[in-house]
Every structure is written in C-alpha cells, then in structure tokens.
Image: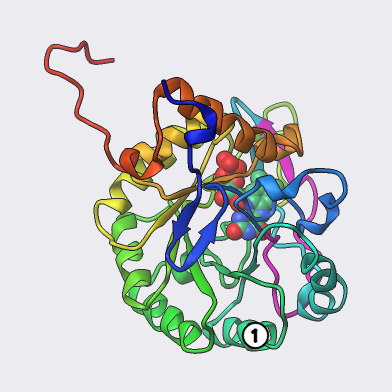
Amino acid sequence: VTTATQIDLETRVGPLVLRTPVVAASGTFGYGDEFSGHLPLERLGAVVTKTVTCEARAGNRPHRVCETPSGMLNSIGLENVGLDAFRARKLPRIRELPCPVLASIGGENPEELERLVAALEEEEGLAGYEVNFSCPNVRAGGARYWADARRLTDTVARLKARTRRSLWAKLSPNATDPGELALAAEAGGADALTVCNTFVGTAVDLERREFVLGASTGGLSGPAIRPLALAQVYEVTGRVRIPVVASGGVVTAAHVLEFVLVGATAVQVGTAHFVDPAAGVALARDLEAECARLGISRLEALRRAVRPAPPGSVAG
Ligand SMILES: Cc1cc2nc3c(=O)[nH]c(=O)nc-3n(C[C@H](O)[C@H](O)[C@H](O)COP(=O)(O)O)c2cc1C
C-alpha cells in the first residue's frame, strides 16, 4: 500500500525544481502577491504572473468575460500594470512569496520582449519567464503574429541569450500544426513549453443581435477545453524533448494526472481560480491522496505512459 508520505511530488521543469507540479496560470491569479497571507502559497509548485508588457495597458472594452457551457470566454486584452509599476510595486512583494514566481511577459515584437527581459534581469526574485506568444485578444503581438516558426525560434534565442533564468514559451492552440511551433520554440532554446493558451471563440446575443464581448471574439477556457488541451499536449510531447507544462481545463487532482499521462511534466490551473481562488492550492494538496489511491509513487513513471484502448472497446 502506498501511503501519502511516500509520494514525492517534486518536479523538475528543465533546470527549475518545483515542490509540486501544480502551477497557477497567468492571468488567473493576479501577480501572486494578492493572495499572500490568504492562501498557503507554499503548496504551489509556482505562480505565473499576469502578462506584463512594456507599457501599462487598460485592456479591451467590456464585456470582457462571459460564461459558456463548461467554460468561459475572456477578451481581457492584456490589462496590466506595465513594466515600471511591476518593478516598483509588484516585485518587492513577489520576492517575499514562499513559492517560485515566473513573470509572464508579452510584446508586440522581439525588441519589446528583449527590453522586458533586460529590465527584469536587473531584479532579484524571479525564477523565470513565461513568454506569452499566444494571446488571442490583442491586435498587435498576439497569437497570429507569433505563429511564424522562424520568428519564434529567433525571438526565443534572443531572449535566451539575455538570461540564465528559466524561459518557458506559451503557445497558442490555434495553429494548423501546433507541433511545428513547439519545435520552433525548442530550437530557439526554450527550457519548457506551456501548452496551451485559450482557444478563439465567441458568443452572440440573439435578442440584441450583437456579440456579447466588446472585442467581438475572445479566448475559451475551463473544463470545455480540457479534451482539446489533452490532445495538444499529447501531440506536442510526441514532437519535442523539452518539458511541457499543460494548461487547459484543470479542476481536480485527477485532471493533473491525466495530463501527466499524456506527457505533461507540470500542470497549470487557470479558470478554476475564478470559481475558487484556493482551487490550485486545494488541488495540490489533493494530489497526494489521488496518487495514493492510484498506487502512484513517482509521477515520472506516469509521464506519457498512456496506452491505446484495447481492441473491441466500443467507440464513443
Ligand atoms: C480571464 C483570463 C485571463 C487570462 N490572461 C492571460 C494572460 O495574461 N497571459 C497568458 O499567458 N494567459 C492568460 N490566460 C490563459 C490562462 O493562463 C490559461 O492558459 C487558459 O485559461 C487555459 O487554462 P484553464 O482552462 O485552466 O483556464 C487567461 C485566462 C483567463 C480565463
């Protein structure tokens, strides 16, 4: 019988060692510091901040979120405090957090991303960067702009040359071949890939004959996208050698293990935080019990260990 104390959830994502594989996803957990004193953040493997851009941004006009069957649409449009305020107001508090923090950074071109990394390299207290190459809700520097393999490789290489910290590339699922972009980011020297950001979607108000969202379209997240994200992670982990951090529809500890089974090394919790800000820490705690129940003593042994369905099983 495997007991909870025998389970080692320590997880290596490239050079970065996390206490557990459960990570708070960008844009769904503030800058992390807001929860200090309210939640046991030491239970999380890491926190990824809201995406920070060179200048502060107000984001898109409302409505910016709407509920959908088993999910939500958002078109926030990268509202954030901007680099200067992030350094002056957020980083001093982030440094005090009891878990590693990665700064999510976003840019309209490679130069902006280089500027962000150069500035943040002067600061203590960050474990790494997650580069948002995949925002569906901005006109410039969004997922479409970065869906260019050569641009992605060159940009990752330029950023990698400026830092010894971990560099994760967060990819969009809205690509004909997600594996191609994953290989491009790996070729540039990314330490890990985050797979994936939200899926482009929309909602219409029939009575008003209008889009619900001020920006017309948004990004779909939550349980609705978990099957899509599972397939993306399986596809990408079959193509690259670097670790993949899964993101999409995770609500329970069992979902974390499902993502590990299709190849993920760590797993992010996003939309679940809008139901309960303690979702990530609760799930990290439940993970030990879920591993014990399933007789799992090492997550490593589960990674990409999924098997084909046996012959004769009824197709759904
Ligand atoms: C309201 C909202 C804001 C988000 N903001 C960001 C962001 O600033 N940067 C980013 O990389 N991803 C952002 N995301 C995407 C999430 O980090 C996550 O990748 C995605 O929602 C899928 O995971 P989930 O189904 O667990 O939410 C945001 C998602 C939501 C719902």
Please tell me whether the stretch drawn in magenta is mainly helix, strand or loop: loop
* Quadrant assignment, res 102: bottom right
Give above or below for 25 relative to 257: below
Give above or below for 275 relative to 79: above
Q: Nearer the viewer, residue 296 or 105?
A: 296
Q: Nearer the viewer, residue 35 or 56?
A: 35
Residue shown at 31% from the left, 40% from the top = 301
Q: Relative to residue 303, is residue 214 drawn left or right?
A: right
Magenta span of residues: 48-67
Residue type at tag 1: Glu
Residue shown at 60% from the left, 51% from the top = 45
Residue shown at 48% from the left, 43% from the top = 8
* Quadrant assignment, res 38: top right
| Residue with the mark numbered 1 | 121
**Crowdedness near tag 1: few (<14), some (14–19) or many (≥20) residues, C-alpha within 10 Å:** some
Is residue 59 part of the magenta span, yes or no? yes
Q: How many marks?
A: 1
Residue shown at 73% from the left, 49% from the top = 41
* Quadrant assignment, res 244: bottom left
Is residue 91 part of the magenta span, yes or no? no
Quadrant where the C terminus sits is top left
User: Looking at the picture, how far across and down is residue 161, in whole percent?
Assistant: 46, 88
Q: Relative to residue 242, is residue 292 drawn left or right?
A: right
Q: Does label 1 point to a residue whose CB lies under 8 Å from ligand 1?
A: no
Quadrant where the N terminus sits is top left
Q: Can the viewer see residue 218?
A: no
Q: Can the viewer see residue 83?
A: yes
User: Looking at the picture, how far across and down is residue 208, in whole percent?
Assistant: 75, 32
User: Looking at the picture, how far across and down is residue 160, in whole percent?
Assistant: 47, 82
User: Looking at the picture, how far across and down is residue 181, in whole percent?
Assistant: 35, 64
Secondary structure of residue under mark 1: helix
Colour style of the rendered protein structure: rainbow
